[in-house]
Image (tube, rainbow, N blue to C red):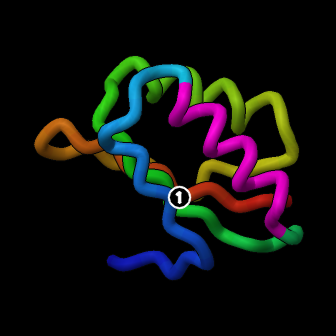
Amino acid sequence: MAIAYDIELDVRHEDSPIPTIRTKETLDTMVSGSILKVVTGIESTVKNIRTLVANNPYELVNYSSASNLYTFIIKKL
């Protein structure tokens, strides 16, 4: 099932902590109710992005991993 999103952030080739920083910066520019898709290739980023979502007004709509790609669908509340 495909989930609709407003913005896609591809940080597959960025070293930690850049994916988390760019995720936060992007979410800060979005309006409430918007959906962000984040794709990363760094496993250590998974915990950092989950923490970012837990400590801010965001909702983790979906998370998946396959072939060393980690995909987050995050809604800004």
Which residue is more in the foreground, 1 or 48?
48
- Residue 64: x and y, percent? 34, 48
As drawn, 22 above or below 17: below
Few, some or many C-alpha atoms within 10 Å of disc 1 (few <14, some 14-19, many ≥20)?
many
Amino acid residing under circle 1: Ile
Assign the N terminus to one quadrant of the image. bottom left
Which residue is more in the foreground, 60 or 35?
35
Which residue is more in the foreground, 63 or 42?
42
- Residue 61: x and y, percent? 58, 57
Say whether residue 12 is left or right of residue 18.
Answer: left
Q: Secondary structure at mark 1?
A: strand
Q: Residue at x 74, y 72 (%)?
A: 34
* Residue range highlighted in magenta: 18-30
Q: Residue at x 70, y 31 (%)?
A: 52
Say whether residue 61 is left or right of residue 27.
Answer: left
Check if residue 25 falls in the magenta segment.
yes
- Residue 16: x and y, percent? 46, 21
Say whether residue 65 is left or right of residue 19.
Answer: left
Residue identified by numbered label 1: 73
Q: Quadrant of residue 67?
A: top left
- Residue 48: x and y, percent? 57, 23
Q: Residue at x 61, y 78 (%)?
A: 6
Q: Residue at x 51, y 81 (%)?
A: 4
